[in-house]
Image: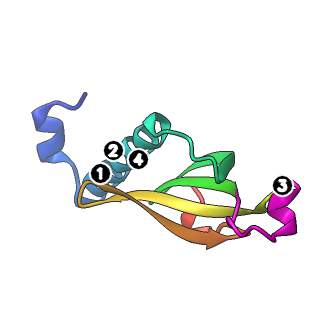
């Protein structure tokens, strides 16, 4: 834990880094405690500067979709999970992780 004097003497950048690490850990814990969704399969998880990255395979739910019928689903695609106003939020990233999100 940080002592009060450490926080008072920290630079703005150090405090922002600390806030980002705390938000990332809160996001990771929220994701870990969530019920797994049948339509999504997490292939890989990584910490990122802005939250937690999940590489996921998904099922679209369309009855005629060959990929979903065969069990594989779509993807894998990266999604960024982060907290906004205390609520867990996700954003589609795509097949590759942009440099600004790499930890």
Magenta region includes residue 10: no
User: Which callout, 3 or 1, points to the residue nearer the camera?
Assistant: 3
Depth check, front residue: 98 or 60: 60
Question: Which residue is at 57% across, 47% downward?
Answer: 37
Left or right of 94 in this view: 53: left
Residue at image position (75%, 67%) is 63
**Residue at the front extreme, as displayed:** 63
| Residue 27 numbered mark, or none | 4
Which residue carries the number 2 mark? 22
Q: Which residue is mark 1?
A: 19
User: How far is disc 2 from disc 4 in space, using C-alphas?
Assistant: 9 Å
Which badge, 2 or 4, comes first in the chain's sequence? 2
Look at 64% across and 53% down and name the residue there.
Answer: 39
Magenta stretch: includes residue 70 = yes
Task: Kindly report the distance in space between the C-alpha atoms of the residues bearing marks 2 and 3.
Answer: 35 Å
Q: Are there few (<14), some (14-19), or many (20+) residues within 10 Å of tag 4?
A: many
Q: Are marks 2 and 4 in contact (CB under 8 Å)?
A: no
Q: Quadrant of the C terminus?
A: bottom right
C-alpha separation, residue under disc 3 versus residue under disc 4: 27 Å
Q: In the figure, is residue 54 to the left or right of 63?
A: left
Distance of mark 2 from mark 1, alpha carbons? 5 Å
**The N terminus: image quadrant:** top left
Above or below: residue 28 compared with residue 85: above
Q: Are marks 2 and 1 in contact (CB under 8 Å)?
A: yes
**Residue at x-position 56% and y-position 41%:** 36
The span from disc 4 to disc 1 (Cα, nearest Å) is: 12 Å
Give the residue number, with chain letter if any, for mark 3.
72
Q: Look at the image and give the residue range highlighted in magenta.
A: 58-71
Pointer 3 and pointer 1: residues touching (CB < 8 Å)?
no
The mark nearer the N terminus, 3 or 1, is 1
Residue placed most toward the observer, 98 or 39? 39
């Amino acid at each position: 834990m940080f002592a009060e004097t450490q926080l008072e003497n920290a630079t703005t950048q150090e405090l922002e880094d600390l806030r980002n690490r705390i938000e990332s850990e809160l996001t990771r814990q929220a994701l870990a405690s969530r019920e797994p969704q049948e339509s999504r399969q997490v292939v890989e998880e990584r910490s990122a500067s802005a939250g937690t990255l999940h590489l996921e395979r998904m099922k679209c739910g369309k009855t005629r979709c060959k990929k979903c019928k065969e069990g594989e689903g779509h993807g894998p695609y990266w999604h960024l999970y982060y907290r906004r106003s205390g609520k867990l939020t996700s954003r589609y990233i795509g097949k590759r992780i942009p440099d600004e999100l790499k930890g």
